[in-house]
């Protein structure tokens, strides 16, 4: 995903009053990566739980995709967590991700 594509996705995350949604960039990154990995990308949903300057992203996916998203020895989800932390840092927030059923 190029930075121009990511900027277009992030523009969709702007609230009506012009304020950016907290964790918008991190959420866009998580949605893009998880949908690219999943066999059923339409079943992937990312919920945002906000706490002050911290964001927790909860990824809901089809049961058949859980193994793909977690990866062998948790390597895929660990890489996703690193990407999420980096995207959150770019916004000046602490961002984390968790895969839930």
Image: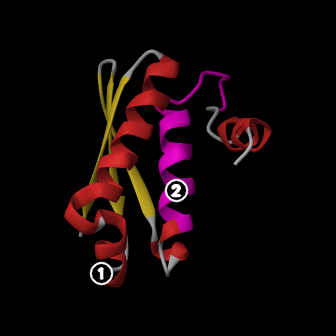
Q: Give the residue at mark 2.
A: 33
**Side of 46 relative to 98 (left or right):** right
Task: Kindly check if marks 1 and 2 are in contact, taking CB atoms under 8 A apart as contact.
Answer: no
Name the residue at 29% across, 81% down. 63
Q: Residues within 10 Å of mark 1 (few under 14, many from 20)?
A: few
Q: In this view, which residue lies farthest toward the left? A: 73
- Where is the C terminus found, in terms of image quarters? bottom left
Q: Is residue 27 above or below residue 34?
A: above
**Side of 99 relative to 91 (left or right):** left
Q: Is residue 101 above or below residue 30?
A: below
Q: Earlier in the sequence, mark 1 or mark 2?
A: 2
Between the residue at mark 1 and the residue at mark 2, the CA separation in whole angstroms equals: 17 Å
- Prevalent SS, magenta region: helix
In the rendered picture of this protein, how many numbered marks are placed on residues?
2
Instruction: Please provide percent x and percent y for residue 8.
Output: 76, 41
Q: Is residue 33 magenta?
A: yes
Q: Residues within 10 Å of mark 2 (few under 14, many from 20)?
A: some
Name the residue at 69% across, 42% down. 12
Residue 22's tag is: none
Name the residue at 37% across, 77% down. 65
Q: Give the residue at mark 1.
A: 63
């Amino acid at each position: 995903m190029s930075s121009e594509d990511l900027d277009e996705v992030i523009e969709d995350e702007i609230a009506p009053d012009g304020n950016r949604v907290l964790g918008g960039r991190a959420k866009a990154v998580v949605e893009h990566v998880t949908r690219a990995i999943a066999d059923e990308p339409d079943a992937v949903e990312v919920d945002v739980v906000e706490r002050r300057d911290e964001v927790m992203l909860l990824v809901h996916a089809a049961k058949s995709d859980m193994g793909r998203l977690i990866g062998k020895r948790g390597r895929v989800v660990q890489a996703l967590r690193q990407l999420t932390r980096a995207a959150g840092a770019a916004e000046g927030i602490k961002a984390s991700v968790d895969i839930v059923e």
